[in-house]
Amino acid sequence: MSQHDTTNDTDADEGRRFGLSVGRRDFMKAGAVGAVAASMGTGLTSLASTAEAGGTRDALVEHTGDWKPSTCAGCTSWCSAQILVDDQTNRVIRTRGHEDSKIHGKNDCPRQDLAIQQLYDPDRITQPMKRTNPEKGKDVDPEFEPISWEEAIDMLADEIAELRENEEPEKFMVTRGRYTYLRPILYSYLPQIIGSPNNISHSAICAEAEKFGPMYTEGEWAYRQYDVTESRYVLAWGADPISTNRQVSHYSNEFGDLLDQATVAVVEPRLSSTASKSDEWLPVEPGQDGALASAMAHVILRDGLWHREFVGEFADGENRFVPDKQVDPDTFEESENSQGVVEWWNEELSDKDPEWAAERAGVPADQIERVATEFADAGSRAISWLGGGPVMQVRGSYAAMAIHALNGLVGSVGNRGGTLYAPGTATEDLPAPDEYVDEVAEEGLDNEKIDQRGRLEFPALKDGESGGGVVTNNAADGILDEDPNEIKVLISYWNNFAFSNPESQRWEEALAKIPFHATIETHASETAWFADLILPATHHQFERWGQLRSTGNGYRTINLHTPVLADDPDDPEDVLENGRLWDVKTDETEIPYLLAESLADKGFDNLLEFFDEEFPDPDSGTTLREEYAGDDFRSRELRAQAFSRNAIKLRTQPMWDPAYRNGDYDWPGGEEFDSWEAFRERGIWHTEKWEYRHRWPSEGGEFGTDSGVFEFDGETLRNALEGHADRHDTDVDTVLDVCNYQGRVDDEDAPNAFVPHYEEPYGMGDAESYPFKFVDHKDRLNREGRSANTTWLHEFRDVNPGDEPNKDVTKINPRDAAELGLEDGDPIVIRSPAGEIESEAKLWEGVRPGTVAKTWGQGHWAYGQVAAEEFGEAARGGSNNMVIGADYDRLSGSSVYYGDVQVAIEKR
Amino acid sequence: MDGTLGTDDRYAVERRRAHTYALLGECFHEPTEDRLAELAAVDDETVAIDVSALREATGDEKALRLDHAKLFVGPFELAAPPYESVYVDAEDRVMTDATEAVQAEYRQAGVDVAIDEPADHIAAELEFVSLLVATEVEALEAGDDEAVRHYLDRQYEFLSDHLGRWVSEIADNMRNAAETEFYQVLADETQSFVEGDGQRLANRLNQLETTDDDVEAVLGGDER
Amino acid sequence: MSRLGGESALQRARDAGPRAYAWIGLVALGLLIGVYGALLTLIEGTTVLGLSDQVPWGILISTYVFFALLSTGICIGITSLSSVFGMTTFEPLVKRGVLLSLFTLAAGGLVIMAGLGQPFRAIPQMLLSPNPSAPMWWMIVLYSVYGGALVAEFYLLDQAEQPSQRLTLAVGVVALVAPILAGGMLGAIFGTAEARPYYGGIFASVYLLVTAVFSGVALLTAVTIVERRLTDATATAVDETLLTGTLAKYLGVLAGVTLLLTAFRHAYGLVATNEALALAHEHMLFGTHSAWALGVGVGLGMVVPFALLALPRTRTVGGVFTASVLALVGLFASRLEFVLGGQVVALTNDPSHQFPLVSYAPSVAEIAIVVFGFALLAFLYTMSRLLFDLDERPDHAATDMTHPNSTATPEVTDDD
Amino acid sequence: MTEAVDSLDDQMAAELDETDLQDEGVDLSMVIDLQRCTGCGACNIGCAQENNLQEGQAYSSRIIETNGKFPNVSYEYTPTLCNQCDDAPCAEGCPTKALYKGDGGITMHDHEKCIGCKACMVNCPYDEITLNKEDPHPRWEETDALIENGTASPKQVKERADVDENAPAYYNPNREVGEHEHPTRYKGVVEKCNFCVHRLNEGELPRCVEECPCEARIFGDLNDPDSKVNEILGKYNPDVLKEEQGTAPSVKYVRDYNGGGYEQGTGEAGLGD
């Protein structure tokens, strides 16, 4: 065997450089030897497994690491995601759409990938910090010092305990921005047990007005999903589905086919991403969307194109919807599915022809005619897609009703290729805290809320109830005027109100005024700049338990957030040990629990009792105390993490616990798992598919309106408005007048108060000194204001049509620029009655003359080194919210961003 | 090689093989106190070579170190160069094709050289075989016959392509040049064990091919 | 055959007087600056150079082109006339011409090496994995051959006792053919880049070779004039009439041809239908670079020398010297204009930025390396002046008695 | 998003699994369907993540074009990457064959042979080659934190993520697989897209193809008649960027970014008033 052998056939096994030298199957075996070597560790002298030897890798991470389920909350699509974690270094490498999701599969929009730069962002807060400079102000350095979690929680508990002793719990406040559906723990139950009515969510600066339309026509205060795979005509109003909000991944994936099978028209003052790919672009004058909606309804009725089965028909078949003519209601037989179309015609539509609308909206009459006709020709497979643009305006509510009512006219409500909602989900509500609310708390809860919702000038008619909805931005005025009461202690979580509210300067003052403010977020944001305590939060996509949901393709999915860095997420020890990059905690569960323990130390143990009693592990029944008995801070942290796990198990129990499911829980249908592990491993649960037309009364269903049918005449709105008027013992006309609407109950030369109708836009600032209308729109790579510190956002900023990489340009039509003597790249100032910002001019034809368009998202002066020009000193770019005044669409309570913002442009 | 190497354990034979290769690999390293202490502590049962002979032959440590340097390290002309490439490719060259081939073999198996020596150093090769046998044992315990078969093949391949081809020559060189008895004994033990093991492996593989007894039966076979 | 030993060189240096010390001090300073620039680039990487992804070739490349073509020009323009074609008029310039060619080539090599991303791999990789389809590879090979030929030629001129006729001729031919091909290949590097019409395809080689001769002759003339002022040995060896007569006219013609070619090049460019090309020319000539590209490159560098040399009145030694120096400065600028022009209109082909104009300014490190090139040239030439007798005429003149007009005195007295 | 049948990615990955890059005549190509593309930039970010690219050095980039006058305006986003030209000017001009035509028709770059002469950057008509002017990601070597012991310094994050290469903390080690790739490159050499050859060798699709949410990037072997690529090219007539340069690019584009229809009509006659 050992003669001098000069021939050695080395080429046979010499790894072919590019060929598949190691097929996948043998690879598995090769790795095994390495594993044995690794396990022997020091036992070896001459060799070591390649991992330890720091040598190069011999397999892609996709083959060695594992995909763990989680959810991306980069926008409200809330896509279900899978995170690739490298097995050797426990590092997150990639994120993609969840392969099992019937909504988007592995497809995820670019935002989701920015999360990785967020997770490994050096500017993340790594441990709790305390302010040492008592003075608060925009250009006052807070001089944060690191402190331990124990001290921080103790400080916060002291403040709350003091409020309770002085029996003024209403001076405690919680503000919430983004959230998961574990939100009730921190957002509702904690303030309820402490006794404060002041928990303020961000909804009114998101798109509450978008829900007003469907509520007062169809009885559904909710966002919709759109059946694009089956649709033949899509008319998008200010919506940009391939770029932002509510299922970007699904709509981007389907858009190519949609262009083949359907006609797409977009109503938008600037050329948006969707508009640039669609068949028709209606460059509407900001604030005039309502005129187009009424004119299109006029055309549909005038030409007899409405959906007979859904709307009804004239007894003798003769179409009496003749322009400028009133119609006798008796001649029209309404269908079982809707009511009031004749009243809508008589009160509003009869004289609103395309010419009338063209004058106001600046869109050619023939285009309006064409779009309306082709929209209606697509019959029930036509979508009137309601976006935030036309409705988040001072008189946006009625435009929302008109736009959504178009779906009613063509019968696409809940129908194939039309506007759908979400099938029922099998989540369980978290246990309620009622028995743990003592009298001091009861008293506190009776106070009026700090955002003054429900007052005469703030109807906020969510779900038909006066004062039902939040008026987020008005909370700042409530704090500043100490009306209804002073706020002494604030917990703000997962929000940056000092940046994301219109006229955000007011929030800077309000936050500076609050004596004690603890903020729970990942970065030192503008809001944290005024905080006394920063409690660093986990990153939602990788480091915590939570649950959100996606809606699309006819389904709704329940998506889990799981701590992907831990090997066994169920084991609190493991999660605390290596589930997080830094010493950070979950805002909605761990921090409230630690707070409860600290409050109990100070004698107020209602909260702790609630958590300990009501949140055992539903699987094994063991309570938190049984799991971890110790009273040292480490055991508290472990209990807090176990509490988070138990909470999510309780929330999703029907899906994974067959016994519970078949108990007295009314199971809505959908996937069934038979163990928590199986469900957690998968991380996503699907409902049944939406059943077309199942809500139509003609098919045995029922709409959520007071009348139970689709209302063109606004009967539910009438009841809500009358409710609000009675509450203030006045009449509807005064309410509408105070709230700055033009509609009146029965006044000939004013629009009818209840039917969907056009109202002239209310300009904030006079047209002479502020000649341009400001078009604010979303950034494709912005994770709701949280991704400005990632380098990729700036490097690829030109994915927004008209924008430039690494810049924050304002897009101006070349004709306007010529008048102002502006050239491409000139530094400019944008001034409005509310404030002014600096920017750079970009001459771009995709902007309507008389308007300027600017992407929202930049203008941070804190948050991090990439987001700000000079951290704590100079802003990078300009924050749109500094020039958008604080005004409201008062019926829905929404803040106003569009349509009415008048600005002036000057060369710097 | 920890773990109980009791005689009644079904795979004792294999474990002993693994341990022997590892031990031999050790011995080719520079003789330090703890290595010699380790050698002294080895339980004869767990090794398939006459370790007691080795133990007696250690003698004075300083001489051993001198001899080790003369044979394997230099600085002058190596008496018994411990590199396969020297024997297999051409008389005096190091880091030739053989080294690269061995390196590729290690990398494919997921291991790498941890000492600053070329991959085809005798200590590394011996240890690599011991690793292959250890993995085979694991596969045996997991009852994955296919994997066991795979590793037996790999062992045989490595012995026939590499270690087996030059072990006798290095042994001859050691026998001619070694001054201390330790390296004389080491030469004999290494050569006889490696060649014997290679032979046994060949028989077993033929037996596996010709008959259809499963791996279990085959391995349970003859003692050393 | 001067056998000046080492010590006599030192001795000559000592008695060259204070002006020489200043000169040597200046050269030393230049070398120091250069070393600093090269080291900085080596350590920090090309980030210290003013380059970007749109302008990969900056002043270092244009300086390399300038030096390489100088070397080529001297050889083609002057030395080969004597070593290959046996002309005698330029014989006094031959020996220093060969040295100047060699040293400018060395300076060029240094500048390009310092500008490379991975300088130490350059030669090994060129040898280990040559790419015959790459003009750059051929250029490097040919210039190496040329360098060797120059060394051989100088050896034959200076040291060899009785060089055989055929050997000198053979070396001379190689020293002529190699630079022509190398210069052509240098042009091909730019010309074959079809994505860059500015370089003009085949025209690049022609343009570079012709302007090379102009620059070579200008350098040789300038250096000779300076040497004549410094040492009377050279003054006697090189007759003034040679300078103001044949050389001046020769230079004048070359200046005219260069001016013509450049004018044609820009004319074609400005009216080109290819908008990017037209914009590039327009930007280089009348845009931000127009001061040095048009003013210095064409105005000072070609028009003024041509005028000086064309008018007999100004064709004095001083006039010729000024013309040569201006020509050199102008050509240095026009090399940069040529290299930069091809990149100034970015290829990002991003229509929304329709032909973005890219800015480029040499960085400190780049200027330092350029200074290094010149300092090295000056240093080598100064040393060679001390070590060798550069005024010596090539041997073949001495032995070839049969050649009628081999005497030193020029047959034409030139007084017009 | 049809549930039952595999996604486009899965089918292409299956095809790739059977393709052995070593075989002669494998001519890998990518077809980009501009109607499906929404211009979202996911390809750019996915590529930057996979190849640890320094900011500003994008293999996968874009050309953006706005034409027309308001209100008739068209905006077009064309994703770009190295075209792996069959007749590659960069490879022809490279003095040391650092750039060469490798298996599958990919224009490969051997960083060990690259001398940093940048001739390729001058020759490439598509500006797809970038230079590493310094060792990449110097930002990640900084040791000072934004807020003293409140936030981490970039170096600390790298240590926490167990990364010691010249790379960000979210370093992707995939390029270590197969020795010809250098995971992060280093100063003085150029770099370019090579269709993620380190992934192809392991039977995975290029990262930009997997990352595209619109399934607008179709990848496969042109010489395999029933590959997805040929299927698409069978339906739509492809065009390539700068065809007049004659480099025969392997990246082809089909259909139009602005896929919408328009209102029929042949315009106005005569010079009019």
Image: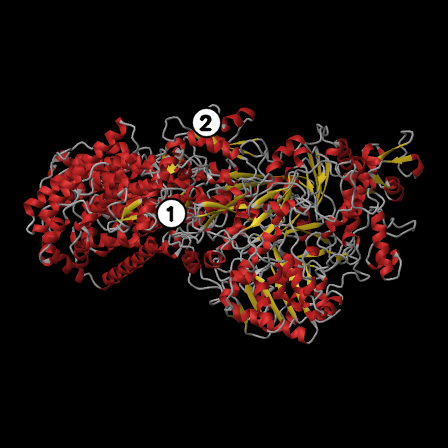
Note whether residue C378 is visible: yes
**Residue A136 on image: x %, y %:** 61, 72
Image vertical order of residue C138 relative to residue D160, above or below: above
Image vertical order of residue B65 relative to residue C242, above or below: below
Q: Circles 1 and 2: CB distance less than 8 Å?
A: no
- State the residue lying farthest toward the bottom: A166
- Confirm whether circles 1 and 2 share one chain: yes
**Residue C404 on image: x %, y %:** 15, 35
- In the image, which disc is placed on residue D222? 2
Image vertical order of residue A27 relative to residue A434, above or below: above
Image vertical order of residue D101 relative to residue A394, above or below: above
How many neighbours does mark 2 have within 10 angstroms: few (below 14), some (14-19), or many (20 or more)?
A: many
- State the residue lying farthest toward the front: B8
Question: Which quarter of the rendering shows the N terminus of chain A?
Answer: top left
Question: Dot 1 corresponds to which residue?
Answer: D185
How many neighbours does mark 1 have within 10 angstroms: few (below 14), some (14-19), or many (20 or more)?
A: many
Q: Indicate left or right for C279 with A759 as reference.
A: left
* Image quadrant where residue B94 sits: top left
Q: Chain of mark 1?
A: D
Count of numbered circles in the view? 2
Q: Indicate left or right for A614 with C404 as reference.
A: right
* Image quadrant where residue A877 sits: bottom right
Note whether residue C304 is visible: no
Question: Which quarter of the rendering shows the C terminus of chain A?
Answer: bottom right
Q: How much space separates mark 1 and mark 2, taking CA atoms?
A: 30 Å
Q: Earlier in the sequence, mark 1 or mark 2?
A: 1
Q: Secondary structure at mark 2?
A: loop
Question: What amino acid does circle 2 point to?
Answer: Leu
Q: Secondary structure at mark 1?
A: loop
Question: What amino acid does circle 1 point to?
Answer: Arg
- In the image, which disc is placed on residue B171? none
